[in-house]
């Protein structure tokens, strides 16, 4: 199993979540974050914004579902046809163990 964490623009979250759910991936954890990427923030006029609002979507999927989930996120989180700086990042890490608290059972 794999954990996919996608850092995306807040205005893209509803669309990405809707498309993931429609594709059979309803289990998602979402949280608000602030940060900056390589561009080190944004300057608008004389004002410099060091912390840019983003949202992180986190899901755990089977290895064979990885490409489908990443494709859905990439397609729907991208700004325009080509994308833009600040559209986000996707991180994929292995999941070694999963436990369900309510049943005290191991799932892997």
Image (spheres, rainbow, N blue to C red):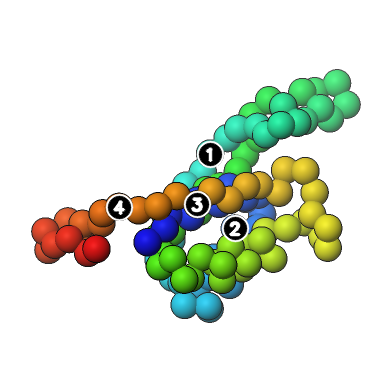
- Measured in 3D between alpha carbons, the distance from the residue under mark 3 to the one under mark 2, in whole angstroms, is 18 Å
On the image, which quarter does residue 41 sit in? top right
Q: Which mark is residue 96?
A: 4
| 3 vs 1, front mark | 3
Residue 58 visible in the snapshot: no
| 3 vs 2, front mark | 3
- Reading the chain from its start, which is encountered first: label 1 or label 4? 1
Q: Which mark is residue 33?
A: 1
Q: Residue at x 53, y 39 (%)?
A: 33
Give left or right: position of 35 versus 38.
left
Residue 92 visible in the snapshot: yes
- Measured in 3D between alpha carbons, the distance from the residue under mark 3 to the one under mark 1, in whole angstroms, is 18 Å
Label 3 belongs to which residue? 92
Q: Position of residue 61 (x, y in %)?
A: 42, 65
Label 2 belongs to which residue? 13
The answer to whether residue 88 is above or below residue 39 is below
Label 1 neighbourhood size at 10 Å, few (<14), some (14-19), many (20+)? some
Local secondary structure at mark 3: strand
- Reading the chain from its start, which is encountered first: label 3 or label 2? 2
- Measured in 3D between alpha carbons, the distance from the residue under mark 1 to the one under mark 4, in whole angstroms, is 26 Å
- Measured in 3D between alpha carbons, the distance from the residue under mark 4 to the one under mark 2, in whole angstroms, is 28 Å
Give left or right: position of 96 versus 58.
left
Local secondary structure at mark 2: helix
Look at the numbered discs 1 and 2 and tell me whether their residues touch, using CB distance below 8 Å: no
Q: Residue at x 48, y 55 (%)?
A: 4
* Residue closest to the eye, 94 or 19: 94
Local secondary structure at mark 4: loop
Total marks in image: 4
């Amino acid at each position: 199993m794999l954990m996919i964490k996608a850092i995306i623009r807040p205005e893209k979250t509803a669309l990405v979540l809707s498309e993931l759910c429609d594709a059979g991936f309803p289990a998602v954890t979402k949280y608000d974050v602030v940060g900056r990427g390589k561009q080190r923030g944004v300057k608008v006029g004389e004002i410099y914004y060091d912390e840019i609002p983003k949202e992180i979507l986190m899901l755990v999927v089977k290895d064979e579902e990885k490409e489908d989930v990443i494709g859905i996120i990439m397609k729907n989180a991208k700004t325009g046809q080509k994308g833009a700086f600040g559209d986000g990042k996707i991180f994929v890490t292995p999941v070694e163990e999963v436990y369900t608290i309510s049943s005290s059972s191991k799932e892997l």
